[in-house]
Image (cartoon, rainbow, N blue to C red):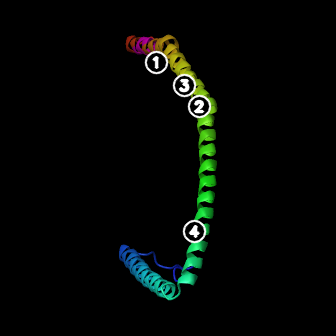
Amino acid sequence: MSDAQTPPLPTSQDVDKEAERRNRQLTVTLVVSALVFLGLIALAVFGLTRNADVTENIRDIFIIFLALESLIIGAALVILIIQLASLLNLLQNEIKPILDATNETIATLRGTTAFLSENLVEPVVKLNSYLAGLQRVLEMVGLKKK
């Protein structure tokens, strides 16, 4: 692949221009949507004030839809509460014991590493330092070659 085929990387100015263009496009879309919504509301109010019988029928239909929506939202809330209770049960009865066992294991590991450090590593380091000192003394006396 040659350099002529690779597109140039966008600069910060390009990114700023693109963000500004998206913001402008979003603003225009929101304003147009708001105007269309207000127009529909005005048309609905105008149409509903012309005939009382039609307005009553539409009102009754909306009341029925709102009642159905309330039932659906109520059922969704019940399901949500059941799921939340299930999650709390999982956290208390399964995850908490795992975390407790993990903390206990970590405490045991800390104790083991401290014990090994005091009883194994420190004596080995001291022995190595004594041997290095003895070797240096022997080299200085001339009994051992470098």
Looking at this view, is 92 or 125 the one in front? 92
N-term mark: 4 or 3: 4
| Residue 64 in view of the camera | yes
Q: Is residue 135 magenta?
A: yes
Provide the residue designation for mark 3: 103
Circle 3: residue type: Asn
N-term mark: 1 or 4: 4
Circle 1: residue type: Lys
N-term mark: 1 or 2: 2
| SS for dot 4 | helix
Q: CA distance from mark 4 to mark 3?
A: 57 Å
**Of labels 4 and 3, the one closer to you:** 4
The C terminus lies in which quarter of the figure?
A: top left
Q: Which mark is residue 145?
A: 1
- Residue at 57% of width from left, 65% of height from top? 66
N-term mark: 2 or 4: 4
Q: Which quadrant would residue 132 be assigned to in this image?
A: top left
- Residue at 46% of width from left, 18% of height from top? 145
The N terminus lies in which quarter of the figure?
A: bottom right
CB contact under 8 Å: marks 2 and 4 = no
Q: Which mark is residue 63?
A: 4
Q: Which secondary structure type mostly characterizes the magenta part of the structure?
A: helix
Figure check: 108 above or below 8? above
